[in-house]
Image: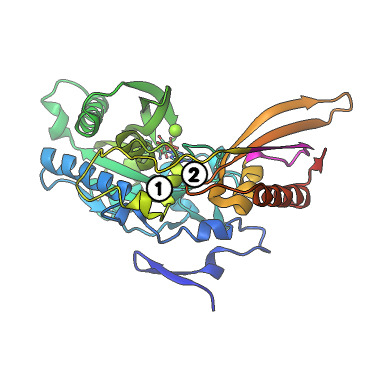
Amino acid sequence: MSTLLEVGGVKISRDDVVRENDPTNNVPDSIFSKIGLQLHRRDNHPLGILKQEIYSYFDNNFPGLFNKFDNLCPVVSVKMNFDDVLVPHDHVSRTYNDTYYINAETVLRCHTSAHQAELLREGHSYFLVTGDVYRRDSVDSTHYPVFHQMEGFRVFTPVDWEASGVDGTSYAAMDLKKTLEGLAQHLFGNVEMRWVDAYFPFTDPSFELEIYFQGNWMEVLGCGVTEQKILINNGRTGSTAWAFGLGLERLAMVLFDIPDIRLFWSSDLRFTSQFSSGQLGVKFKPFSKFPPCYKDISFWISESFTENNFCEVVRGIAGDLAEQVSLIDSFTNKKGMTSHCYRITYRSMERSLTDEEINQLQGRVRDEVENKLNVTIR
Ligand code: FA5
Ligand code: MG
């Protein structure tokens, strides 16, 4: 019998989600195993603590206004995930290289924006949607193929902006920045941050907020003024709105000093016991730092090669032992063949790895890269 789980009232079996011989499906078991874990609904987990703290900010500033959803099923239609939020048909995020498809019409949501249109149609005008989202992506300390977002949405009608002397779009943009700066202040107190202009198909103007962390500017959220078409399509002609999507792990990494995104998935008591409900910003004490082990692999790529496919092979074999995958060399020879050399960093958060086990993992990576990715190992 196949594993059966239930999320938000929807029953999901492994065979619904993972079908190795179906070319319209690209969901591996490593991803299926994360569905239903809903880290954001655990009270004593950094993501659950952060979610509650963001709820408090909105409850204090806008008592009773925002409806909260944190149990909407991550299996959604292509229409909800892309069409309803105006993602163009040729946008990269729609490709099998970027998104996990269950079949040609159904995906694992790649953002919580997938729920905007449905909630507007249901009559909600102010809402927060928290959930697990899924993306084929690179491997490093701030990217993971499953992470958590919180979507915020607020609709304005002419009475809201008429007295202000500015138009509805400017009013929404001002209110958005004020609301998010207030949230950042509430969560962080003083921290270095900056607004960056951005592009999203569903908002205009669009912005991203970056926070200075571990010596780099890290993007923590995207936001903007909702495209009129979305409002009109969903019964809100004559109004304006703002929307934002927060990356919960990114915020939690800064707040709790969590150095690696894989830690959120750890069930090691030395991690889980450090956090408790209501305690925002208790600094994580690393219980150990085990040595990394680097392994390089070089191969001639073919036309169909993509880095996301390579990263997924590495994750499929090494799981959370894969800390980082980086391209360290690339060249094209006189015959026009291109070679890539990748360095894989293996490291456990919980223990020392033996040479033997790493060599074995690397051997399996080499075999699978050659068999599945149509490349020639050098
Ligand atoms: C979005 O997903 C938009 N839906 C956000 C949005 C909503 C914009 C509403 C406008 C209006 P983006 O792909 O940039 O945008 O992701 C949003 C946030 O998720 C990022 O700022 C980052 O904090 C986080 N994020 C993105 N990819 C990853 C990843 N692989 N691992 C962890 N966090 C990630
Ligand atoms: Mg972004």
State the residue position of label 2: 144
Q: What coloring was used for the rendering? A: rainbow
Quarter of the figure with the N terminus: bottom right
Instruction: Tell me, yes or no, whether the two marked residues, 1 and 2, touch with CB atoms within 8 Å.
Output: yes
Looking at the image, which is closer to me, 108 or 271? 271
Magenta residue span: 294-307
- Distance (Cα) linking label 1 and label 2: 10 Å
Residue 281 coordinates in the image, percent (x, y): 25, 38
Query: Mark 1 CB in 8 Å range of ligand 1?
Result: no
Instruction: State yes or no: residue 306 in magenta.
Output: yes
In the displayed orientation, state which residue is furthest to the right: 335
Tell me which residue sits at (33%, 20%) in the image: 194
Query: Mark 2 CB in 8 Å range of ligand 1?
Result: yes
Q: Is residue 89 above or below residue 9?
A: above
- Report whether 326 appears left or right of 80: right
Residue 369 coordinates in the image, percent (x, y): 73, 47
In the displayed orientation, state which residue is furthest to the bottom: 1
Tag 1 secondary structure = helix
Tell me the kind of residue under disc 2. Tyr
Residue 308 coordinates in the image, percent (x, y): 62, 42
Q: Earlier in the sequence, mark 1 or mark 2?
A: 2
- Report whether 231 appears left or right of 305: left
- Local crowd size for mark 1, using a 10 Å CA cut-off: few (<14), some (14–19), many (≥20): some
- Report whether 291 appears left or right of 175: right
**Which mark is drawn over residue 378?**
none
State the residue position of label 1: 264
Quarter of the figure with the C terminus: top right
